[in-house]
C-alpha cells in the first residue's frame, strides 16, 4: 500500500461517517416537529368540537385526518379519544347537549332544595349568620 494516501483515506472515511450520522442517525423516537404538528392539529379538532356552529361532517373529517396523519408520537389517550369521537360522529352525535326543557332560554338554572329539607330547610338556607361559634346552629327564639 501507498502510505502517502493513508491520511487522505482517513479523512474521507471520517467525513463519510459524519455525513451518515447527520443524515440517518440523528435521533430515535418521534421528531419534535411531528409531535408539535400532531398537538396543534389535535387542539384544532378539539376547538371544532367546542364550537356549536361547526357541522358534524367537518368535525368528523378533522378527527379522521388526525388519526390518519398526526398520531405519530402522540399519547394513547389522545388516539383513543379521536377514535371515540369518530365513532360518535358516525352515529350522529354532534356532541351538543339538548336545550333545557320547561324554562326560560336565559341559560341560567335555579338551585333546588335538597330532598328531605322541605319548606323548613329552604327557609333556613336563606338565613345568614344562623350559626353560632364552632359552626353549631345558633339557638332560635
Image (spheres, rainbow, N blue to C red):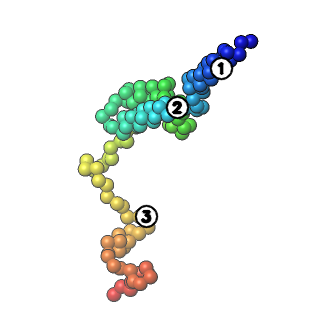
Element type where label 1 sits in the image: helix
Element type where label 2 sits in the image: loop
How many other residues sit within 10 Å of disc 1, few (<14), some (14-19) or many (≥20)? few
Residue depicted at x 71% and y 16%: 3
Residue 123 in view: no
Q: In the rendered view, tell whether residue 134 sits above or below residue 71.
A: below
The residue that disc 3 covers is: 115
Image spot of residue 138 (x, y percent): 39, 83
Tell me if 11 is positioned left or right of 2 in this view.
Answer: left
Image spot of residue 15 (x, y percent): 59, 22
Residue 12's image quarter?
Answer: top right
The foreground one among 46 and 74 is 74
Q: In front of the other: label 2 or label 3?
A: 2
Residue depicted at x 43% and y 64%: 115
Q: Residue furthest toward the top?
A: 1
**Mark nearer the N terminus (2 vs 3):** 2
Residue 123 badge: none
Q: In the rendered view, tell whether residue 114 sits above or below residue 10.
A: below
Q: Residue furthest toward the right?
A: 1
**Mark nearer the N terminus (1 vs 2):** 1
Image spot of residue 135 (x, y percent): 43, 79
**For the residues marked 1 and 2, what is the alpha-carbon distance in whole angstroms?**
37 Å
The residue that disc 2 covers is: 31
Residue 50's image quarter?
Answer: top left
Residue 7 badge: 1
The foreground one among 73 and 112 is 73
Q: In the rendered view, tell whether residue 60 sits above or below residue 119.
A: above
The foreground one among 44 and 86 is 44
How many other residues sit within 10 Å of disc 2, few (<14), some (14-19) or many (≥20)? few
Tell me if 36 is positioned left or right of 120 in this view.
Answer: right
Element type where label 3 sits in the image: loop
Residue depicted at x 31% and y 55%: 109
Amino acid at each position: 500500500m501507498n502510505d502517502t494516501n493513508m491520511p487522505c483515506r482517513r479523512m474521507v472515511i471520517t467525513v463519510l461517517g459524519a455525513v451518515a450520522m447527520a443524515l440517518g442517525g440523528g435521533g430515535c423516537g418521534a421528531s419534535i416537529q411531528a409531535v408539535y404538528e400532531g398537538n396543534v392539529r389535535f387542539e384544532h379538532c378539539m376547538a371544532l368540537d367546542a364550537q356549536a356552529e361547526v357541522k358534524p361532517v367537518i368535525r368528523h373529517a378533522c378527527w379522521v385526518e388526525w388519526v390518519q396523519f398526526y398520531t405519530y408520537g402522540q399519547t394513547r389517550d389522545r388516539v383513543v379519544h379521536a377514535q371515540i369521537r369518530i365513532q360518535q360522529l358516525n352515529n350522529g352525535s354532534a356532541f351538543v347537549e339538548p336545550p333545557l326543557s320547561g324554562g326560560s332560554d336565559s341559560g341560567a338554572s335555579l338551585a333546588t332544595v335538597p330532598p328531605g329539607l322541605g319548606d323548613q330547610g329552604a327557609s333556613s338556607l336563606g338565613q345568614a349568620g344562623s350559626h353560632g361559634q364552632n359552626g353549631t346552629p345558633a339557638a332560635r327564639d
